[in-house]
Amino acid sequence: MDFKILLLLLCITFISVQGETPQCCLSTAPLSRRILKRVEKVTIQRSNGRCEIDALVLLIRGKRLCAPMWQWKLLEQLKSSLIGQQRF
């Protein structure tokens, strides 16, 4: 009986110490301008030990897409051109 309680406590401790697993991009793919215009949120993933690659993590219609870092410049250009086209 005591062994079962010890095992249960050990499992609970292991699960709580382990924490949450990171949501990393495993690969990237270039995205079209049409898709980049629909970006709602951008976060940068760095290869700092938790994740293996650098990537742009884009939220589009509730879905996470992974783009290569070089597309950051294109995203900035699209953002500035869209702001310039808006009428107030």
Image: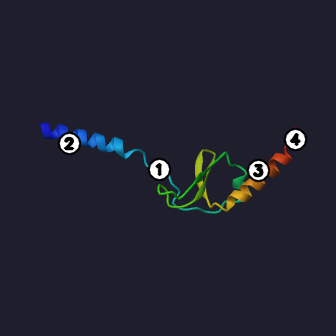
Residue 87's disc number: 4
What whole-number distance in Å separates the C-alpha atoms at marks 4 and 1?
41 Å
Label 4 sits on a secondary structure element that is loop
Q: Earlier in the sequence, mark 2 or mark 3?
A: 2
Please name the colour scheme applied to the rendered image: rainbow
What whole-number distance in Å separates the C-alpha atoms at marks 2 and 1?
27 Å
Picture coordinates of residue 37 (x, y %)? Answer: 73, 51
Mark 2: amino acid: Leu
* Label total for image: 4
Whether pointer 2 and pointer 3 mark residues with C-beta atoms closer than 8 Å, the reply is no
Picture coordinates of residue 24 (x, y %)? Answer: 51, 54
Q: Earlier in the sequence, mark 4 or mark 1?
A: 1
Determine whether 79 is above or below 27 in the image: above
> In the figure, is residue 2 to the left or right of 8?
left
Q: Which residue occupies the extreme right position in the image?
A: 87
Whether pointer 2 and pointer 4 mark residues with C-beta atoms closer than 8 Å, the reply is no
Q: Which is in the foreground here, disc 2 or disc 4?
A: 2
- The quarter of the picture where residue 65 lies is bottom right
Q: Which is in the foreground here, disc 3 or disc 4?
A: 3
Mark 1: amino acid: Pro
Q: Earlier in the sequence, mark 1 or mark 3?
A: 1
Q: Which residue is mark 3?
A: 79
Residue 7's disc number: 2
Residue 34's disc number: none
Mark 3: amino acid: Lys
Q: Earlier in the sequence, mark 3 or mark 4?
A: 3
